Amino acid sequence: MQLNEKTDTGKLKFNVDIKEVNEKLFQDFYEVIDKNSSVCNKNADQEILQAFLKVLGQGISIESKENLFSFNEKSQFSADFEASLNKGDYKNLELLMTVLPMQLTAQGRLETSKTFLNDLLSIGANQTNFQQSGYLDGLIENLIIQGMAQHHGDKLVSRFEYKFGEPRFSNY
């Protein structure tokens, strides 16, 4: 699946590649969505959820590379990640959410420009007061001190891994 959207002021690019999935259950899931999209069915949400939980119950692995969100050439955020969910008996959403931290593994890389963070944080804020407050510089400094990111010129880079409910950053 790929979503590409470009406007005069920005760009959004999102890619997802499903690497491992039970194809029969995924097809069943798609058919449930298709069936419920053309008729009014008060049980549609529950049917879709149950079909989705069956897909997840057999395990799934995804890869998402070369994702990009930008306001302009100097204001960009990019991300690459891989994630997998182990096989399990996910009977309902509450159970899935309870066991998800121990069943999910993920790793990835995030990169953003200081300009992007400034633009993002200043949306809806008084930009002059925001820039003068030094908030962004303090935020970046804290991320670096905590080992969550490295600073490379105007770029902030973070590499992460998530296993057994524990996030780990490898930015040294």
Image (cartoon, rainbow, N blue to C red):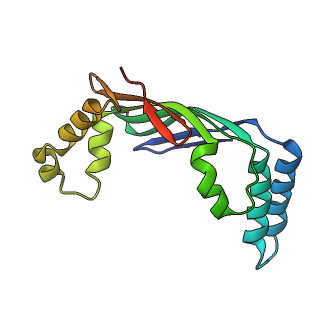
Q: Residue at x 61, y 50 (%)?
A: 100
Can you tell which quarter of the image residue 75 is in? top left
Pick whichever, 133 or 93, lies toward us: 93
Q: Please state the horizontal and vertical placement of residue 59, each as a whole percent of the image.
A: 75, 42
Q: Please state the horizontal and vertical placement of residue 118, each as a whole percent of the image.
A: 26, 42
Q: Quadrant of the N terminus?
A: top right
Pick whichever, 6 or 129, lies toward us: 129
Name above or below for residue 89 compared with residue 153.
Answer: below
Question: In this image, 79 relative to 94: left or right?
Answer: left
Q: Quadrant of the C terminus?
A: top left
Q: Please state the horizontal and vertical placement of residue 7, each as a whole percent of the image.
A: 47, 45
Name above or below for residue 95 compared with residue 56.
Answer: below
Pick whichever, 32 or 138, lies toward us: 138
Q: Can residue 69 be spotted in the picture?
A: yes
Q: Please state the horizontal and vertical placement of residue 161, each as a whole percent of the image.
A: 50, 32
Q: Residue furthest right?
A: 24
Can you tell which quarter of the image residue 2 is in? top right
Q: Residue at x 22, y 57 (%)?
A: 125
Question: In this image, 98 relative to 42: left or right?
Answer: left
Looking at the rendered structure, the number of numbered marks drawn on it comes to 0
Q: Can residue 66 be spotted in the picture?
A: no
Q: Residue at x 89, y 46 (%)?
A: 24
